[in-house]
Amino acid sequence: MLNGMNAVVTGSSSGIGRGIAKAFAARGMNVVMHGIENPDEIEADRTGIEAESGTTVLYRRADMTRPGDIRELMQYAADTLGGVDVLVNNAGIQFVAPVDEFPEEKWDAVIAINLSAAFHGTKAVLPAMKSRGFGRVINIASVHGLVASPYKAAYVAAKHGVVGMTKTVALEVAERGITVNAICPGYVWTPLVEKQIPETAHSRGISEQAVIEDVLLHAQATKQFVTIEQVASLSCYLCTEDAASITGTALSVDGGWSAA
Ligand code: NAD
């Protein structure tokens, strides 16, 4: 149903982004994967997804803290695929600490990778989308784009920023056939979440098991982790013509967290 469309998914060497890249390819899309993990492992993954889907699946490394790298990634996708129909701004990091102990370089990195990179990527792809009169920008924000949790000042600030930017850009391009939306997942079991368990245990002075039960799943009414496939499926839907009137929204996929 999405046959022949071209997509860039940032941060697709792992977790949610990888799931989105796989789902796009399975539905007939050509995809540029991206990420900074081990190049050999990414290459094996890329070839596997390409063989399974029969579409073109490429990989390009780019440091999301460097605007020039981001522009080159988008240019590479446009040149090799012949245009970018869909951009998923997904790359992200987390850091957990009380604000008065929050390392300044961690603040800068979280804002750069989670928020500013989405700006640079979107800015790079929009002119061609406007010329073609079609585009889909999907920003993987978070429930933390809508509500806060302690010890996540940088992440919550970045994700609220992503939701605000989503609304603004959506209004700017609404008459050009381009939609811009944010997806706001609750906790999804990925390396990003696994990594913050010891940090959160340290910040709160509790065990790692208590972090899973009493912190991560506490606010998620379903008491279940959101799955990567659920976020990927919504991303696919947003690329369809049926979703053409959905723009400027923050779509919660959070097991009821933000309803409380
Ligand atoms: P992950 O750690 O599995 O993957 C993160 C991806 O970002 C990787 O591909 C990594 O290479 C890339 N990345 C990290 N730093 C980078 C840098 N400096 N330059 C380039 N790429 C870089 O994480 P995930 O859980 O899949 O998270 C993906 C997105 O979903 C993030 O934006 C995250 O904030 C958001 N999110 C995750 C959850 C969750 O519970 N896992 C919930 C809500 C939102």
Image: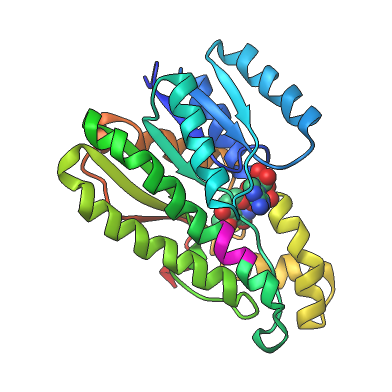
Residue 38, above or below 197: above
- In this rendering, the answer to whether 79 lies above or below 18 is above
Provide residue 25's location: percent of width, then percent of height: 52, 22
- Dominant secondary structure of the magenta stretch? helix
x then y, percent, for residue 200: 75, 73
User: Which sits in the foreground, 212 or 172?
Assistant: 172
Residue 141, horizontal then vertical, whole percent? 48, 57
Does residue 229 appear left or right of residue 211 in this picture?
Answer: left
The residue at 45%/51% (across/down) is: 120
Q: Is residue 238 magenta?
A: no
Among all residues in the image, which is located at the extreme left?
Answer: 175
For the C terminus, the image quarter is bottom left
Residue 57 figure quarter: top right
Question: In the rendered image, which quarter is residue 119 located in?
Answer: bottom left
Kindly identify the residue that appears in the image at 75 percent across and 70 percent down: 211
Whether residue 29 is visible = no
Report x, y in % for residue 162: 43, 61
Instruction: State the residue at coordinates (23%, 32%).
Output: 131
Please give the name of the residue rendered at 77% of the width and 65% of the height, measured from the top-left corner. 197
Here the colouring is: rainbow
**Rendered-image quadrant of the N terminus:** top left
Q: State the extent of the magenta-drawn residues as a range.
A: 109-113
Residue 18, compared with residue 247, is above or below; it is: above
Visible in this render: residue 243?
yes
Q: Residue furthest front?
A: 68
Q: Nearer the viewer, residue 97 or 169?
A: 169
